[in-house]
Image (cartoon, grey):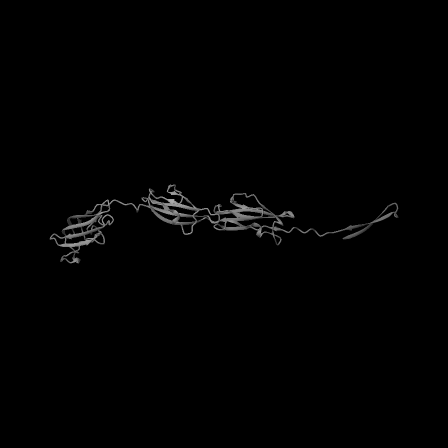
Amino acid sequence: TYTLTYQICEKADFGNCDTAIVTVVVSDPPAPPTPVVANDDTYSNIGCNTFGLVGNVLSNDLKGITRASLDLVNFTLLAQTGNSTKTDPNITFDALGNVTVTSLTPAGTYTYTYQICDKLSSDNCDTAIVTITVAPRAVTTIASKACNDDSSLINLLLLLPENTPTTGTWVDSKNTNSIQGNTFNPLGLALGNYTFEYVLADQTCPRTILLNMEINDDCKVLPCGNVIVHNAFSPNGDGINDLFNIESIDDTTCYPENDVEIYNRWGILVFETHNYNNTTNAFDGTSRGRTTVKQSDGLPSGTYFYIINYKSLDSNNVLQNNKKDGYLYLSK
């Protein structure tokens, strides 16, 4: 505080005077407002078991060195504009600054901008960016097979991994009309591979299970082929026609049992076997019967005689005895 005394006098009468005091008070300048600082926020890998409330954007903001609570600042979510800004209606901010991400949010990265202002000074403000990354939905792949000639219904829930919730929904993306609820009917489907989705719209852990279903015709009962004897072969080791071939005799479903005998021109048994199969148990031109010819030498070229006794199943699944015989030519 400063004081100053001064006097004024009339010019025509110097005795006519008076005095006064001037007081000057100099105050300290007002302190600037304590700055508010809004720090950017990042919420990453939001997904299974992390949906819901993910955080509060004010948790890392400051007024001076004090946490910027709503007692000190006002919070405002700004309008999100610009091509680089991606938002989603399933991501929400409440008036307290809490951020909620629901399980309906598609995978991706989203950005939001907010502002905080000092309650004591509306010009004392700062902005920050919130970045939220939602992870892709978890996908598990399983595989199975089914026959398109089988009328049996398949309970798809039994194919799912252990402890999978049964509250999901099957999606038939190819519209095969083979799924009703949790039941799959492969009858009549075209051969090939199909993918079906089992979608679990769980609020805390949404996920998808992909079922790769191979449709085959392995269960079809094919008609039995005729037993046809190819009566000439050339066991010379060239890999072509080296074995005596009895067509269809190796189909044990149709022909469960057989006996094959081969004789030379003099009636001597040179080969005999049970359950001939054209491969591992087959006549390759070497002796396996009661003959004096050494096996390592092989039988000579010439005409031989075969007898084939085999069993077949009739339409009532009753075994029937059959026989074929004739001449066989061996050429080296």
Of residues 256 and 141, which is closer to you in this image?
A: 256
Location of residue 242 in the rendering, given as x and y in whole percent from the top left corner = 20, 52
In x, y percent, where is residue 303? 13, 50
Q: Position of residue 70 (x, y in %)?
A: 61, 49
x, y percentage for residue 49? Answer: 48, 51
Answer with left or right where residue 258 lies relative to residue 150. left
Would you say 145 lies left or right of 18 here? left
The residue that appears at 78% across and 50% down in the rendered structure is 23
Q: Is residue 332 visible?
A: no
219 or 166: nearer the viewer: 166
The residue sitting at 77% across, 53% down in the picture is 2
Looking at the image, the residue that sits furthest to the left is 266
- Observer able to see residue 4: yes
Which of 175/170 is in front? 170
From the viewer's perspective, is 23 left or right of 122? right
Number of numbered callouts drawn: 0
